[in-house]
């Protein structure tokens, strides 16, 4: 898998596009996207399946709705997995790779885990009952202006805001915040994690720097995942892994992910270990 976009520039271009021009993505661009998807891999070794849908295959807005959240989109892609450990993180990692790749091409997307008719899209995309179908995204050319509901949504979830470093990153234990100035070359990958998208912009990622490793934890927002049949914030953790991984690779910092390196530290409430990145 080739990461041929620059992380910071591309993440700054990316935002959740909810209003699209009624213009289809050209077949040769779609081919490029499909071959990029075919090349994807993830550090968790779990299979992520991609499914495509064009609006002319849709049977009616009603059945395939996004509750008025997405307007104008002609094309969608959906992702499915088998529900097994680290599969939601794998999905987050791979779909974020695609979303950044599309942003680099000037195409808009919007992660949708809640505001879409899951049954309607599952049947239009021929998704089997044995597959978990957590997320879809529209993709296409962004309209010049946001629609009214989109603006209201962004205000409500404070979509342009991100938590500060001291709330997200820790040194050795969870009572010592990690100083941005003291982390050397890890400042960039951590900053890229901080800027990522997340469900309802809740930013559940927490990182503990200890013994030459970054340990990633999920701050599980109490009650939030009860709205879903799976832990949607694990998908956010996969997005954090992608942003971190693409950033360290861009800067030539060597290391590997491992899911069985939980350090012995006292955990704050609602904090759960997910994976580590160990420097080589
Ligand atoms: C896993 C996941 C699920 C999301 N689900 C929805 C959704 O159902 N509807 C929606 O409008 N936005 C959804 N979003 C988009 C977030 O609200 C958005 O990423 C966040 O507010 C930050 O805004 P930005 O993407 O423009 O930076 C989701 C994002 C993620 C990562």
Image: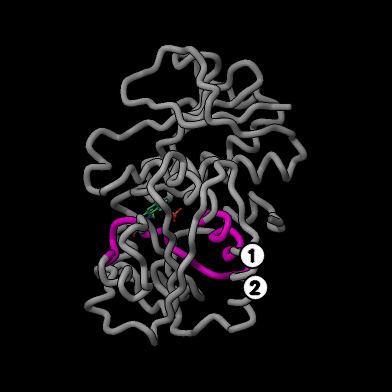
Q: Which residue is mark 2?
A: 32
Residue 114: % across, % down: 29, 57
Residue at (39% x, 67% y) in the render? 18
Query: Compared with residue 3, is residue 138 higher up or lower down, i.e. above or below?
Result: below
Q: Is residue 188 above or below residue 261?
A: below
Relative to 148, is 277 on the left or the right? right
Foreground residue among 271 and 159: 271
Local secondary structure at mark 1: helix
Closest to the observer: 275 or 107? 275
Residue 36, disc: 1
Question: Is mark 1 in CB contact (under 8 Å) with mark 2?
Answer: yes
Element assignment for label 2: helix
Residue plotted at (41% across, 40% down): 203
- Whole-Å distance between the Cαs marked 1 and 2? 6 Å
Give the image location of residue 91, x and y in percent: 48, 51
Identify the mark at residue 274; answer none if there is no mark: none
Residue 56 in picture, x, y percent from top left: 39, 87
Within the magenta stretch, is there residue 22?
no
Read off the magenta span: 95-118
User: x, y (%) of residue 36?
Assistant: 64, 65
Q: Describe residue 264's horizontal placement relative to residue 101 as left or right.
A: left
């Amino acid at each position: 898998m080739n990461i041929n976009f620059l992380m910071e520039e591309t993440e700054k271009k990316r935002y959740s596009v909810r209003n699209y021009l009624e213009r289809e993505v050209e077949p040769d661009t779609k081919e490029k996207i499909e071959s990029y998807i075919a090349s994807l891999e993830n550090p968790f070794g779990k299979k992520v399946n991609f499914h495509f849908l064009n609006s002319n295959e849709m049977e009616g807005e009603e059945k395939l709705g996004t509750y008025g959240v997405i307007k104008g989109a002609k094309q969608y892609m959906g992702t499915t997995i088998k529900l097994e450990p680290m599969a939601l993180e794998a999905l987050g990692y791979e779909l974020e790779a695609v979303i950044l790749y599309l942003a680099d091409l000037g195409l808009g997307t919007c992660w949708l885990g809640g505001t879409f008719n899951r049954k309607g899209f599952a049947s239009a995309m021929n998704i089997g009952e044995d597959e978990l179908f957590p997320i879809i995204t529209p993709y296409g050319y962004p309209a010049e202006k946001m629609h009214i509901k989109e603006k209201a949504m962004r205000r409500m979830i404070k979509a342009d805001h991100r938590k500060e470093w001291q709330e997200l990153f820790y040194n050795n234990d969870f009572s010592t915040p990690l100083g941005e100035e003291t982390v050397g070359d890890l400042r960039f990958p951590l900053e890229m994690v901080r800027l990522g998208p997340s469900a309802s912009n809740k930013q559940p990622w927490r990182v503990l720097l200890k013994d030459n490793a970054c340990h990633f934890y999920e701050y599980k927002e109490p009650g939030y995942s009860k709205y879903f049949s799976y832990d949607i914030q694990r998908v956010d953790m996969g997005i954090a892994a992608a942003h971190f991984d693409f950033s360290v690779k861009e800067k030539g910092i060597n290391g590997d992910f491992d899911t069985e390196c939980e350090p012995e530290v006292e955990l704050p409430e609602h904090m759960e270990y997910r994976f580590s990145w160990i420097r080589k």
